Image (cartoon, rainbow, N blue to C red):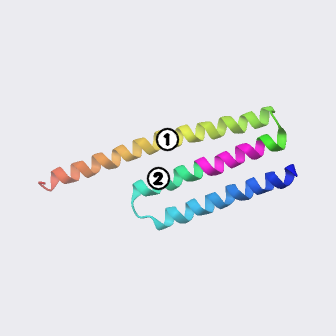
Amino acid sequence: MTADLVAALLVLAVLAVWLGAAGFARLRDPLDRMHCIAFVNATAGSALLVAGFLSDGATLRAFKIAFLVGVSLLAGAASSHAVGRALRQRAAAAEEGTGR
């Protein structure tokens, strides 16, 4: 039973990554693409985290997975904020340059 649940969670993680890649390829705006990256980090990371705890229990390896997922979410949020701010400033500078 546990092995089937772990396998289902891993399939969910892979499907989330493929869905995020398809969305990333389809969307044209860089800000929209950042949402795809955040989606992949949150869904695939959470699925892997739950699969790790179901597979091993509360072991050091499962806590390492939790740490890596947490760092990935925090780093993703920080980089999304920085990129979004840079894109906003670039658009504002382009508007000032055109005389609007």
Q: What residue type is labelled 2?
A: Met
Q: Name the residue under label 2.
A: 34
- Pointer 2 or 1: first along the chain: 2
In this view, which residue lies farthest toward the left?
99
In this view, which residue lies farthest toward the front?
1
Q: What residue type is labelled 1?
A: Ala
Q: Main secondary structure of the magenta part?
A: helix
Q: Residue at x 62, y 50 (%)?
A: 43
Is 10 part of what is drawn in magenta? no
> Viewed as shown, does residue 15 lie left or right of 96?
right
Residue 91 at x, y percent in the picture: 27, 52
Task: Specify the quadrant of the image occupied by residue 32.
Answer: bottom left
Q: Mark 1 points at which residue?
A: 77
Where is the C terminus found, in terms of image quarters?
bottom left
| The disc label shown at residue 23, or none | none
Task: Specify the quadrant of the image occupied by residue 82.
Answer: top left
Relative to 80, does residue 25 appear above or below in the rendering?
A: below
The secondary structure type at the circle numbered 2 is helix
Q: Which residue is drawn at 66% across and 34% down?
A: 67
Write the start and end of the magenta stretch as one range: 42-52
Q: How far apart are marks 2 and 1 (CA)?
A: 10 Å
Relative to 8, does residue 56 appear above or below in the rendering?
A: above
